[in-house]
């Protein structure tokens, strides 16, 4: 059985295409994917090989491979695809492409994203069990970290953040149709929740995608906590006392 | 779209005012802001670019810029303002001033603070949903880490810690009036909660502000946990059994 | 009283068998056990000397000793046993063999495992208090990280993950019969829960065992959270609204 | 106002007694106190200057000073006291002795402890609100990490761990009488809970004290979680289903 430590010894001979994933610049996509995956792992978002991330650099997209320990990835593990031709410009020697690839591509082609993050965040899974069709939260400052998308600028404090929830499928690639449908039906969303699975979040750049993902996860976690106290997360300000057990309010 | 990694390459030519943010001393405000923001990030207090911090060094105040990833800040990102003239002595080349600036200034001018911390702590948001006008907790040892403010010394174990809650506004700078009003009405407070937003905490020095913020966040978190068991956080000692479900008490 | 820092000064004279635990390769079992235990400690899985891990390298098995602080282990602390003869090829000078040894051996001999992990995960203990004979969870994406065992490949999203729960005994080694019985009765399991104690998880390689353990712990934690909202973790998709308090659903 | 970063510049002239706190050995008490406090801080046990630790080295006891940030301590901050004469052999230049000192001394003189740890663990505070006179938990594997105290050896799985709870006082040093009383009345305890305050845990060596504290905190946290599901932590094995809501049991 082959080693799963991700550090599989590649053949001594470096191939020309390996230049695509070789850089001493920490902000090179191949390096950054590894750094961000370590961060996501420490947040519990990509535990047990779950989740993934892809970064676009002009016409090239970098994608972490399938089924690897995300916190142990090295640049040599990376796939590089030409966004136009959909051909792999570089493949690692021992891994399979990520089943998330068509989903990442949807964010690139339909939204011109610069990066797309997929996590198995437990808050995302819990929210998908506590809401039917859409996650909604309103009147929370952290919402202001999220973009309007359909026009420049960010949501306001009094806005409602709405994220569609699609049904999970047996195979990750089969989510593509539903994800694309949600992207069309929710032109203002920068994320799609997948029921009993996790979330996809994208942004104009890798840093924006990271910030959006952090802000959304904060809001998902907060919504679960609010619900545990009986407070629906999208009520009007000042209505809290109608929902909280009076024995503990105030 | 400009990079958001905070490490934007500043022009090669260093400006004279850059001396204000250049030091090998880790306790220099420009360095310390970066170190503390990394710590706050690991606590979940400044996730998704939320929150901020400002430190005063005699008549100069150092402020983290708006909308940056707090855990990735570098000294070059810092604004430096003259506290008397309110003029910027140094501005970074690509960032906007923090919308928290007038709020930090309120702590400096009304309370002669040495530093002011702003977080989006989830415990602070939860508490703002579970209390109407003021957060109150009493008879907990950790309260003793907090200052009396109106006279030298610290609160006692039997004292009640009271922190006012102000309503959030669409724009952070518009919080200024309500924050100043709360500072006047609560002469003994070293913090103000902002409903559905977070908290502002200040102190005589940056280390005191940090300690006060930690102690308050501990108490906010504890209060939420107490409420989840039906125990109001400001009851008298020995009354717990009247509130806890008898099936699990003792 | 002897030191418990694990770094007991071994005699100056190195013994020939110490070659078995001496390597500069971080993936050598003696080094890897130490690295993984530090990771498990940071997850709260081996707090207070609890838990353990064993790795097999062809016919040799490496085992952490009894009662040591798992996050402070060094390769010199390791036992090495011949899997066929059950004789120790190398023993540390001051420690006792782990009481988990016969349990680890069961995974090696009955399942040809490459490694076995034992944790005192609080999620595992909670699950053992909330389920009678078996832990069951279904229709969660993370299940797909777990193997079918009885045939090649992994569980699917619509599959139910079932993990048997055995009763704890006064002495860890006395768990062996019940563990072996569970391994026989549940040919598809890669883990056994021990009531009010923790969990044993094994895999074909150390990395697979690690990934399985992470994925299972994620599912145990999620199941406890689901139950706190009234949702049984093995219901059909779409039945959630029948279980969640309607005041907070949607 | 004096700096609180703990790194106050001591006078250039080293005093002879500074030899007591100067060592390159990481297991020297003055170094170890600093290392362990950083660990405790990351666990949330000594947030906001709360908590403390003392280590005994034959007849000398090392004590962290009062009111400092525990994660930023350096050996120069340490007090060293002669256990017999109770005279300070070394005092830092700018700090006050810890108010915990008489409590630590009680563990040294009444129990011949090698170290004593004091934390403000939130689990300890919660337990003190959910139990009247004593914390009790039974039939959990982690209990086996705790000593019998009155005779050699450790508690068994079927044993009940009992930790007395004393009432808090306005001043920490005034806890001494109640703590000593509890130590006398509970000859088998290695810890005392202080209501609405935290816990004191001691052991024969610093490593044993650390392990006991970890194991106890694990059990306190577990007990709170058990109670949140309606399960009293000291019921007999197999009685869980009588307490858990049948809608979520099994």
Image (cartoon, coloured by chain):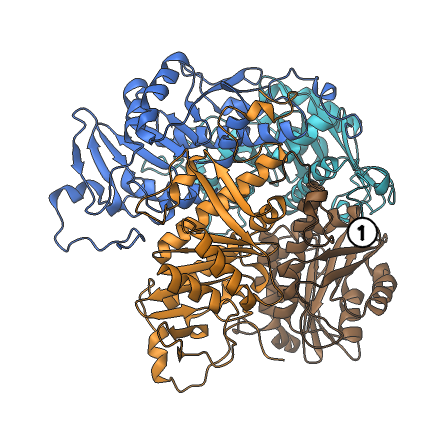
Chain colours: A cyan, B brown, C blue, D orange
How many numbered dots are placed on residues in this image? 1
Identify the residue shown where x is 76% and y is 24%.
Answer: A133
Identify the residue shown where x is 67% and y is 70%.
Answer: B154
In percent of width and height, residue B88 lies at: 75, 73
Residue situated in front as seen by the camera: D6 or B68: D6
Q: Give above or below for D180 relative to A118.
A: below
Residue situated in front as seen by the camera: D213 or B11: D213
Mark 1, secondary structure of its residue: loop
Answer whether residue A30 is visible to the viewer in this image. Answer: no
Q: Give above or below for B25 relative to A87.
A: below
Q: Give above or below for C6 relative to C158.
A: below
Label 1 crowd (10 A; few <14 / some 14-19 / many >=20): many
In the shown orientation, is residue D109 left or right of residue C102?
right
The chain carrying label 1 is B
The quadrant of the image that shows the N terminus of chain D is bottom right
The quadrant of the image that shows the C terminus of chain D is top right
Residue A239 location, quadrant: top right
In percent of width and height, residue D134 lies at: 54, 46
Q: Give above or below for D45 relative to D90.
A: above
In percent of width and height, residue C227 lies at: 63, 27
Residue A14 location, quadrant: top left
In percent of width and height, residue C159 lies at: 54, 15
Residue situated in front as seen by the camera: A80 or D141: D141
Identify the residue shown where x is 82% and y is 47%.
Answer: A157
Q: Which residue is mark 1?
A: B195
In the shown orientation, is residue B70 left or right of residue C144?
right
Answer whether residue D186 is visible to the viewer in this image. Answer: yes
In the shown orientation, is residue A158 left or right of residue D83?
right
Identify the residue shown where x is 66% and y is 53%.
Answer: B46
In the shown orientation, is residue A137 left or right of residue C118?
right
């Amino acid at each position: 059985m082959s080693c799963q430590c991700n550090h599989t010894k590649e053949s001594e001979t470096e191939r020309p295409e390996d230049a695509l994933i070789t850089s001493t610049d920490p902000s090179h996509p191949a390096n950054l994917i590894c750094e961000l995956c370590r961060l996501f792992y420490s947040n519990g978002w990509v535990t047990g090989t779950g989740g993934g991330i892809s970064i676009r650099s002009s016409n090239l997209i970098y994608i972490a491979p399938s089924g690897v320990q995300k916190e142990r990835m090295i640049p040599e593990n990376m796939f590089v695809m030409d966004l136009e031709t959909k051909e792999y410009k570089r493949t690692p020697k021992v891994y399979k492409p990520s089943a998330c690839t068509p989903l990442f591509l949807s964010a690139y082609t339909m939204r011109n994203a610069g990066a797309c993050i997929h996590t198995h965040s437990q808050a995302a899974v819990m929210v998908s069990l506590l809401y039917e069709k859409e996650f909604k939260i309103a009147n929370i400052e952290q919402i202001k970290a999220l973009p309007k998308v359909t026009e420049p600028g960010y949501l306001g404090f009094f806005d409602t953040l709405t994220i569609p929830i699609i049904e999970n499928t047996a195979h990750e690639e089969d989510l593509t149709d539903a994800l694309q449908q949600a992207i069309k039906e929710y032109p203002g969303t920068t994320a799609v929740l997948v029921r009993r699975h996790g979330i996809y979040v994208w942004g104009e750049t890798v840093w924006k995608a990271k910030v959006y993902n952090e802000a959304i996860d904060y809001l998902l976690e907060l919504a679960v906590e609010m619900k545990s106290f009986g407070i629906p997360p999208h009520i009007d300000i000042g209505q809290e006392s109608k929902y909280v057990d009076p024995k503990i309010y105030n």
